[in-house]
Structures are given as structure tokens and as C-alpha cells.
Image (spheres, rainbow, N blue to C red):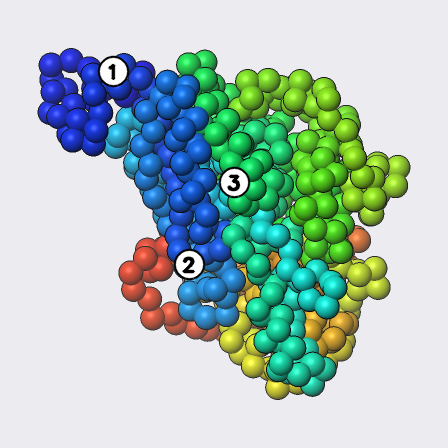
Amino acid sequence: MKSDSIKKGIQRAPHRSLLRACGLDDEDFKKPFIGIANSFTDIVPGHIHLKELVEFVKEGIIAAGGVPFEFDTMAICDGISMNHEGMKYSLPSREIIAATVESMTKGHAFDGLVLIPSCDKVVPGMIMGATRVDVPSIVVTGGPMESGEYKGKSADLITVFEAVGAHSAGKIPEEEVDALERCACPGAGSCSGLFTANTMACITETLGLSLPTCATTHARTEENNEIAFESGKQIVKLVEEDIKPSDILTQESFNNAIAVDMALGGSSNTALHIPALASEVKGLDVDLQLFDEISRNVPHIALISPAGEDSMMDLHLAGGIQAVLKTLGDKIDTNQLTVTGKTIKENLENVENKNTDVIHTLDNPVHEDGGIAILKGNLAPNGSVVKKGAVADHLMHLKGPAKVYNCEEDVTKAIFNHEIVEGDIVVIRYEGPKGGPGMREMLNPTSALAGMNIKDVGLITDGRFSGGTRGPCVGHVSPEAMEDGPIAVIQDGDIIEIDINNRYINVELSDEEIEERLKSVKHPERDLDGWLRIYQKLVHSADTGAILR
């Protein structure tokens, strides 16, 4: 065992002395040491119950003959950090989380890891760290929040954001916004729609890193507790059998993950996180081109909020991710190993799709191709990303004049001042990984437009969008403005064309004109210190997953 390096032999007497101070005895030194990365915090709804959930994991580890050691990672709530300086720290937090898991595992010679994340950046961050150290690992995602209810209809965080826009447009009174605020988020768990947190949980289960049904099992349920307990038992078995992330995370398992992402119409942020995860495994080729290829081959078969009216609970009751895998049939490589110690094929033996109105069959899809599309053109030579499954059919093609803003705050102010009209193509730049820095989500502008019922408007940014975004919102434009991407030269009035079905995004400028304008571009200066200054120097482009190298 790896932990023998801190507990065996006369030279490890000082180490054992410190471990005895933590309550260990002679018998414990014979057992595997299991690290538990817990992301509990009092300020993030998706994580407030993890202090309780971790106890079931510990019980499982002890029952199976292991010794649990809990440690903490950070967790930032994207909803709370939205639309202010705090959002600049959200994506960078992924790298701190990964480094924490790596450091704690290496520093204490853990034999195995249980990862307990919930929200957006915590899931990929923990997996990146575990993959980096490559010890047996299992993931217990915290589970979705129940949907809220307002006037007999489901409500969630996005409902509240859009209500602010509706109020600004004079469509609803402040009292209604207040009522929605009080009921939209009823308790613990990741925000209830198929936003980034729940999408990443679904991706994790598809990759084979969590037990079946984990992704859609809701927070603070007996089923959630049972999965945590069984995961604690299973990690000891994985250590005994030496099944590591490198045995599970193959090219084929990543292909499967992207296929499920396309089938569900998941968050566009997966185009950052899946390549970032793959970057920790040698020899894999996971880029935007692969997303595009799989998107053209895998239909969109579920219409989960914000794209539709179905909830994560509806998906769960229909059979969850295992039913999605079963439905996709030969579009999935079922020979891939999972943390059950079995292949996907073996896990699916008794699985059925219990509701074809929620998980559509392949011969009756929501859309013929995947829920995420990769657009390229002279505006985004290296690619851009749009949540196609959440775009109305009549908005798949837009052409209009640009209105250009150099930060989220300016465009938000313009929207609430009623300066944006239907037919505009709004460009938000200098919000990329380096330009922000931190690649902020643009949920406030998109939800404001939706709430104000300004429909025929395109949004383009080198930043990113929330998993709760709907409409023709194209993010991750690469190269970004701060790296002299063409988006830096766009001027008010330039004609931009967005053609989602044909995977095309273009500005009506010649290559020569773009090059000439780039010569006179002056990038905004950022007065940075601390972590963001370091991050800006090291971060790579969005089309590579915004990884640090």
C-alpha cells in the first residue's frame, strides 16, 4: 500500500506518533488509508448537506476495513458570485481544487480517494486532482436540489434571474420577484435544472467514476445516503483490486461522456471541463473537434430545464443516466470499466427506460443532432460553443448589426436601460480566460433579456455562459480578445451572422480588414494582484479547456 511509506518500519515511528495523536491504533496501521475530499461549506446550497453525507461514506469505509481521513476543498457558488468581481474566481477555483486533492493525496500517501463534490467547478476540479495522482478513486456527487414551486409551476434559480428582467421591463411587480426569490431554491442540493453542476454529475457517472444512479439521486434522501455508504465500501474494494482512474478514463469513456452530454443537451461548460479532465490522462485526444463530430452523430433525446419543462427528478424517475446509456445503444461503447468493477454493459443488464416522454427513443428524438454545437468561422477560428438544445428553432439563424461591450457590467447596464433591441447581435469581449481574467459567466445579461422578452437577439462572448442559459448565446469564442482574436476588432454596426445548424459564425469583414484593425487594437489594462495575476499568466485558451500549463 502507498500508505506503508508513512506507517511501516522503525524510521516511520515519528509518523506513527502523529497518526496516533489522530486516534489510530496498531490495527489501523494494517488497513488502507482512504482520503475523503469533502467540499462542505455553509454558503453554497449544493454543499450544505455534505457534512452529513460524508458520515455515511466514513461508515462504509470502516465497514469495509479502511481508515477514513476527511479533508476539505473550497467551493464557490456561481449563482452568488454572478455579476460581480467574485465570478472571476469561479473557473480559477477549479485549479485550486485540483491542486488541493493532489497535494493532500501525495502529502499523506493515501491509498484511495472518495471525492464529494456537488457544484460546477468542484466536480471537475476534484476529478482532475485524483486523475493526476492516479490512486483508486470514486466520486459521490451531492445530488440535485428539489425544484421550487410558484403558482403551480416549477421554479428554480434561473426563474429568479429572469424575473428580475421581467420586472425591469414592467411585466411583473417587485412583490412577485420577492415571492419567487423565497420559493425557487427550497433546500440543499445543486440547482435543480440541467445546469453545469448536474451536467457534470451526469458526465461523472457516464465516465464510470460514480456508482449507478448517483448523478440524479437527489440531496438529503435515503437513496443519497445509501449511495454514499456503498461508495465508502467500494473504494476499499477498488484499492484491493488496484482499479485506478487511468484504468477507467480511456478515449472511449470520454467519447461516451460527450455522447451523453449531447443526448441530454447539457451545459456548454462541459466544453471546458471535459477537455480539462482529459488533459490529465496521457495519450487522449479530446478537443472541440471531437465534440462537433459526436454532436453530429448523437441525437438530443431529453428536454430538461432550462431547455424544457422536465426536471432532474423526472430524469431520475425515468431511470437516470443508466437509462440514457441504455437508450443510446450502439452509440455508447459499453465495454468500458466502471468503479463497480464491472463494465457499462454489465451495469446495464437490468436497466430500462421507464418514461420515453422524458428520455426519448432514438427514433423519436427532441432534435436529430446533439444538444451542444461547435461553431467556427472568421469570428471564432478556433471554435465557439452554443447550447443548441436550448435555442428555439426560429433563432438557429441570426444576422444583424453588432453592439460591442468590453465587459459584462457595461452590457448589463445597456440591457436594463433598454438599449438592446431585437435584431442586435451583442458582443461581450475581454471576458475570456486571460481577458477577464477568469472567464466569467454571462447569466445576468442572458436572463435579463429572457425576462424582458427580448427574443431575437444573439449574444457572443469570449467568456462563458451559465448552464442555465437558453437562447442563441455563443460563448468560448477562441482566440479570445486579449489574445488578439478577431472578436477584438468588432465594431458597432459590423454585420455578424450566426448559423447554428450549419456550425457557422462570421463577421462581414475580409481577412485583410481584420488584420489591419488588429494593428490598432489596444487591450484594456487589468490591475491585478494575488491569485488572478498568477492565473492570467498561466491559463490557456478556452478551446483547450482553459487549463494551466
The amino acid sitting under disc 2 is Ile
Give how far apart the Cα atoms at labels 1 and 3 are.
31 Å
Horizontally, is 454 left or right of 342 in the view?
right
Please provide percent x and percent y for residue 83: 50, 70
State the residue in front, 145 or 306.
145
Give how far apart the Cα atoms at labels 1 and 2 are.
38 Å
The amino acid sitting under disc 1 is Glu
Q: Secondary structure at mark 3?
A: loop
Q: Is residue 478 visible?
A: no
Q: Which residue lies under the disc numbered 1?
A: 27
Q: Nearer the viewer, mark 1 or mark 3?
A: 1
Q: Of label 1 and label 3, which has the lower sequence position?
A: 1
Identify the residue shown where x is 72% and y is 82%: 171
Find residue 506 and report its image quarter: bottom right
Please provide percent x and percent y for residue 306: 69, 57
Q: Is residue 216 visible?
A: yes
Name the quarter where the N terminus is drawn.
Answer: top left
Q: Residue furthest right?
A: 363
- The local crowd at label 1, few if under 14, some if 14 to 19, many if 20 or more residues have their Cα within 10 Å, is few
